[in-house]
Amino acid sequence: MLINENYRDDGSLRKQDEIDMDGYLSMRDRAPTILRGVPFFSGREAEISVFREVANDLSRAYTANATIVVEGPPGAGKSALMCQFMEEMRSLPPVGVREWLPVLLSASDSESPTDIADAIDRAIVSRLSEELLASKSVEPILLDRLSEYWGKLNLVQAMDKAKEFFDRGGSALGFSLGASREGPPKSIAQAATRRPAWQSWQIVLLIDEAQVIKPGVTNAGYGTLSMLHQGLSQAPLSFCAFGLPGTQQVLSEVGISRLADSRCIRLGGISDTAAQQMIERCFKRFGVVSGEQWLKAILDRASNWPQHLAVYLNAAIRQIRNTGNDSMDARIADLDKAMREGDRSRANYYRQRIARLNQYNIEFGELAMELAKLFQENKFHIPTSDLMKAIRSFFPNITSAEITQFIQESENSGFLALSDDDKNEYYIPIPSFARYLHGLGSA
């Protein structure tokens, strides 16, 4: 059964938005990877449509090139999109008899067949634990000590699926029941051969901070991810990699080539519509009334940048609640105080980005400040050739290698982005970043 690949966000509240106010306020600007979507996530229709396209390809058994790479600077919403991919998998129809299984994986583990296998096993055990709890066949306290009890208890009556998993040689949480004694698998194909229980799942590896993937590290199997990308493994495995700009290049160094252009996603700000939907969803969930002025203030300050939207909206809800008025009437809350709180967080974000630039070269931060004025004068867009001339005019002794590094680190810091169209120009994706650098305060 295939799904509609054309995702549309109509702005309505969803299951993932059912969060209590204390839980939401504790999130601040983070997207906790809790195997479901982030509250009030909005937009990203093209990106989610790409994921659905890949899901349909896997349903058709087209495993080659079923890879998605998501690149973007800190704060662009990579973690939020990863969580939304997890949310999608909660509602996707099964692939034949296989259920969808998202597996979180660190970059350092992504080239190790052993680490990948262990992560998959842990994810299966976690899913089975949820099913055991839902079945009410065992006491919930057992699940709190699953790592201690799992290999020792007979759970046959509680969950036949669990018995099948272990009877087939499944391993998890340090226990190995009936598994091969040949030592750790040296390839993902070998791991898949030893894990027949994997065939019950459509497994998607979600690799975070993928820009630090390195070939040849300890326990790595060269070509592990390439085998998955090319569909050469017999296991129902695919992966999505999330990282800073340049992640696609890093993946090429571990054997991944011919990635479909549409499946390399470069994140920037979200659309005006999505930004407004995010705020309206949050206001509706928490019953905020008369919030029109607040909505406008947040949109003006946040520049549709996901991190900024998160902190300003979070500050707004905090201030409206602090009035002690159960009606959540925004008119009697301190709008200026909420915006100042957001301003401080936004300024700290920019300070961290400049500190990252200076970490590589103490003059990079100064160069960014010089360029900020030029970008403002040119409505935040500059042709690539003019940008190179400007860099050399500000710092005549700068080398070509240093220019390349400055551009790369500026993209990683959210200061610069290369236009996706054919204009061959750079732009500043967050206009307030340029204003901050140019010393125009928090406006």
Image (cartoon, rainbow, N blue to C red):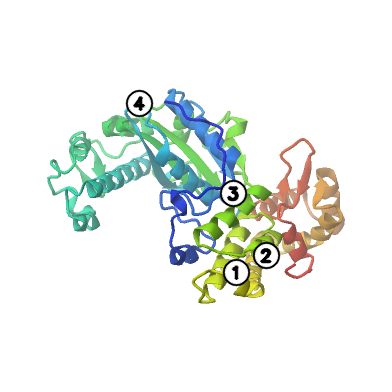
Name the quadrant containing residue 87. Answer: top left
Where does the image place residue 221, in percent across and percent down from the top left? 41, 37
- The residue beneath circle 4 is 96
- The residue beneath circle 3 is 244
| Residue at point 67%, 73% (across, down) | 336
Left or right side of 390 for 409: left
Answer few, some or many: residues within 10 Å of disc 2's Cα (few below 14, many 20 plus, some between 14 and 19). Answer: few
Considering the image in quadrants, where does the N terminus appear? top left
Q: CA distance from mark 3 to mark 4?
A: 35 Å
Where does the image place residue 27, in percent across and percent down from the top left? 48, 63
- The residue beneath circle 1 is 330
Q: CA distance from mark 2 to mark 3?
A: 35 Å
Which amino acid is tagged 3? Leu
The disc label shown at residue 293, or none: 2
Labels 2 & 1 near each other (Cβ < 8 A): yes
Residue 34 appears in the figure: yes
Where does the image place residue 138, in percent across and percent down from the top left? 17, 51
Labels 3 & 4 near each other (Cβ < 8 A): no
